[in-house]
Amino acid sequence: MKHFNLFSGLRRGAVIAALSMVTAATAGITPASADWLKAESERFIVYSDGSEGKLRDFVQELESFDRFLRLRMGLNVEESPPRKLPIYLTASRSGLVKVRPDLPENVAGFYMATDEDIFGIALRDQTVDTLKHEYAHHFMMQNFAYPYPGWFIEGFAEYYATVEVQKSRVLVGQYNENRAYWLQTASWMPMTELLSKRPLQTARRRDTYYPLAWLLTHWFLGDPGRQAMLDVYLRDVGAGGDPVEAMERATGLDAVELSRTLRRYMSGRIPYQGVVIAYPTLPVTVTRLPRSANDLLLLNQRLKIGVSEEHRAETAAEVRRAAARHPEDPLALLALGHAELHFGDPAAAEAPLQRLLALEPENVEALQYLVRARLEARKDADTPEDADRLSAEARSLLHRAYRADPDNYATLLLIAENRNGGEGYPNDNDVTVLEQAYLLAPQLGQARINLAQVLMIRGRNDEAVPLLEPLVNDPHRPSPGARALLLRAKGISEADADAEEAETLRRGEAEAEDEPAAD
C-alpha cells in the first residue's frame, strides 16, 4: 500500500522555478453547428457549452492544479495519468439533472465511476471548488490508494478544493466560506464520531462533518511537527489501529482535548500558504461538436450511470426522440444503440450500432455495446453451442476494440468477463488483463474487486487486501461486497468483524457522552 509522504515535494517558503514555456495550440474551430465545445489537453478532456476562451482558461487551471498536487505529494510533475479524465461543464442545473434526474438540490457538480466511464460534471462559470474536491478524491485513488479513515479522505479533498491557481503563485490552505460558517455557528459533532464514522453513518450534528474534517486536516498540515504526527496516525490506522485511540497515540490528545485544540486554532488567524510558482501554458486542442451534442451529449452520460427501474422506459423514449432528429449521426446512433440495449428493446440495439461501425469501424464504444449484447444473450443461451458462438462473437469484437484502443479499461474488463467460466480461468493472462484494467481505472470499485477475486483464486490473498481496503473505507459508497471479500482474504469471519465494529462504536458513543457539546 502506497501512503504519501506529506509535503515531500515542497519546502516551506520554497520558490519553484518556472517550467519551460510551451506555446498553446490554437486549433481551428469548424463553423458553428452546436453550442458544445470539446477541449483536450495532456490530462483532461473537457466539454463545455460556454465560450472557447473560458474553456481554455479552465483547462489550463486544471492542468496546473494536477501539477501542484503532484508537486505537493512528491510525484513526478511531468508524468501523465494513464487515462485522461472527461469533465462536462454546463450552464445550469438542468444540465446536471439531464445526467442525474434524481440529483439533490444545491449540488453544483458530481463525479461518477462506472464500468462504462469515469467522469466529472459541474456548473461552469462558477467556483470550481466542487470539481477540485472530486478531483482530489480521483487523484488520491489513482496514486495513493490506502485505508485512510473517512474524515481524512474528505478532509484532504476539502483542503485542496480551495487551492487558487494564480499567474505566478498558488495559494493553498484557504477556507471555504460555507464550511467556516458551520464551524462558527453550529454545534460540533463529537470528535469520537468524526474519527470513527463515515459521513453517512453520523447521526448527531452531521452538518459539521465536512467542516471539521477540513479543520482537522488544516491543523495537521499547518505545521511540520503536526504533519509528522499525522503521518504516524495514518500509518497506525492503516495497520488496523482504532482511529480514536490512534489519534491519542499520535498527538497525545484525547477526543475532548483535540476538540478544544481545534477551537483555539480556529479562533486565531487561519494560516494559508502562497507558493511562488509559474506553470507553463500547455497545448489545448478545441473542436466544436456536431449539433447532435445539444440533444444527446449529457443524455448519453445518463445512460452510462443508469436510472431507476421506473424511469428506464422513459429514458429510452427520450433517447429515441432525440436520435430521430439526427439520422446517421454517430453520437445519435451510439446513444440509441445503448439506450435500446439497457433500457429499451435489446433486439433493436444491433441495427444502430452496426450502422455506426459501418461509418466508424474503430468506434470502441459501439464495439463494447455489441459485446455487452452478446454477453447478455449468452446468459439465456439454449444450448452450449449457442453460448460458445456468442462467446466467439464477443471475442472477435473485443479483438477489434482492443486493437483500436489497447488502454481502454472497459474493454479489458469485458475481455475478462467473456473469459470468466472458460477453461483454465483465471490463467496468467486473465490476471494480467485485470491488473491492467485496475491500473487504468483504480477509482472503479469493480476493477478492484474483479482483480482481488482472481488473485484470491490463485492464492494471492495478501495482494488482494490492499485492493479492497480503500473500498471498505470509502466515505460515500462503502462496498459490502468488498468487505466480505476483504474478510475472506484476511481469514476473519463476518461475525467476529461485526462484533469488533459494534464494540468500537459502543466505546465511541460512551466517550462522546463525556464530550461537551460545543456551541
Image (spheres, rainbow, N blue to C red):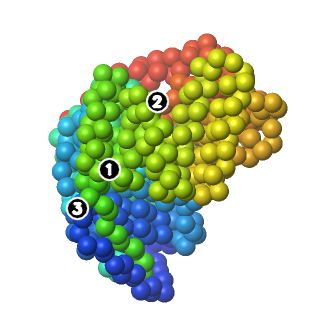
Number of the front mark, 1 or 3: 1
What residue is shown with label 3? 35
Q: Is residue 450 visible?
A: yes
Snapshot quadrant of residue 317:
top left
Q: Residues within 10 Å of mark 2 (few under 14, many from 20)?
A: few
Q: Which mark is residue 347?
A: 2
Q: Secondary structure at mark 1?
A: loop
Point out the tag, 2 or 3, that comes first from the N-terminus: 3
What residue is shown with label 1? 327
Count numbered badges in the picture: 3
Point out the tag, 2 or 1, that comes first from the N-terminus: 1
- Please report contact status of discs 2 and 3: CB closer than 8 Å, yes or no: no
Q: Residues within 10 Å of mark 3 (few under 14, many from 20)?
A: some
Q: Residues within 10 Å of mark 1 (few under 14, many from 20)?
A: few
**Residue 418 % position (x, y):** 66, 35
- Please report contact status of discs 1 and 3: CB closer than 8 Å, yes or no: no
Q: Is residue 196 visible?
A: no
The image shows residue 374, relative to residue 158, as above or below, that is: above
